[in-house]
Amino acid sequence: MGILDCIANCLNPSDVFNICIKLCSQLMTHGDPVYRLVGFYSIGVISEGCQEQMRANLSDILNQMINGFEDSDINVRSKSFVSLGYLCEFCIPEICDHDTAVIPYIVKALQEESNSDVVKEKILFSLQSFVESMNDDKLLP
């Protein structure tokens, strides 16, 4: 994944985004969980180099990511939440507009008994990243 990150940061971000998002969309719906894992994780990996493109397409990307949060495979779920953490890091402030869509999935995943402590650690990473990207007015009850 380091090579993909380098490509996203060194080449034309529009070209990288267009190619990667198309491939990732196909991978995220693949029958093999390893392919799905790569698809979801790659979204997070390219998020730094393709920040502008990610922000412009954030609603569509998050709609796809939600499938990863609820995937039947524990490793896919784990990497999906890691990717969300990366998106939170690099898509500020736009990611904050999606709090009501994303946070319920984070809470649900933390309550899910089938998620191991390792997966819950990744979920907490995404929650921390999400909360850190929010303004104070969004955090107050």
Image (tube, rainbow, N blue to C red):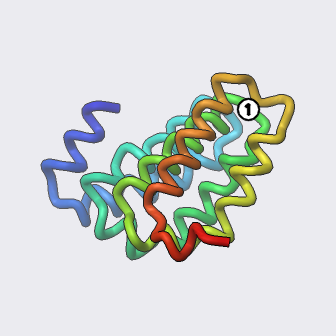
Image coordinates for residue 48, horizontal then vertical, percent: 29, 52
- Decide which of 33, 86 is in the foreground and name it: 86
| Figure quadrant of the C terminus | bottom right
At horizontal 46% and vertical 70% (from top left) the residue drawn is: 135
Q: Total marks drawn?
A: 1
Image coordinates for residue 93, horizontal then vertical, percent: 40, 71
- Decide which of 77, 121 is in the foreground and name it: 121
- Decide which of 140, 29 is in the foreground and name it: 140
Instruction: Specify the amino acid type for callout 1.
Output: Asp
At horizontal 52% and vertical 57% (from top left) the residue drawn is: 131
Q: Can the viewer see residue 36 in this picture?
A: no
> Image quadrant of residue 22?
bottom left
- Decide which of 58, 117 is in the foreground and name it: 117
> Image quadrant of residue 120?
top right
Residue position for label 1: 73
Image coordinates for residue 4, horizontal then vertical, percent: 29, 39
**Image height of 123 relative to 18, above or below:** above
Image coordinates for residue 91, horizontal then vertical, percent: 38, 63
At horizontal 33% and vertical 68% (from top left) the residue drawn is: 53
Q: Can the viewer see residue 85 in this picture?
A: yes
Disc 1, SS: loop
> Image quadrant of residue 103?
bottom right
42 relative position to 51: left or right? right
| Figure quadrant of the N terminus | top left
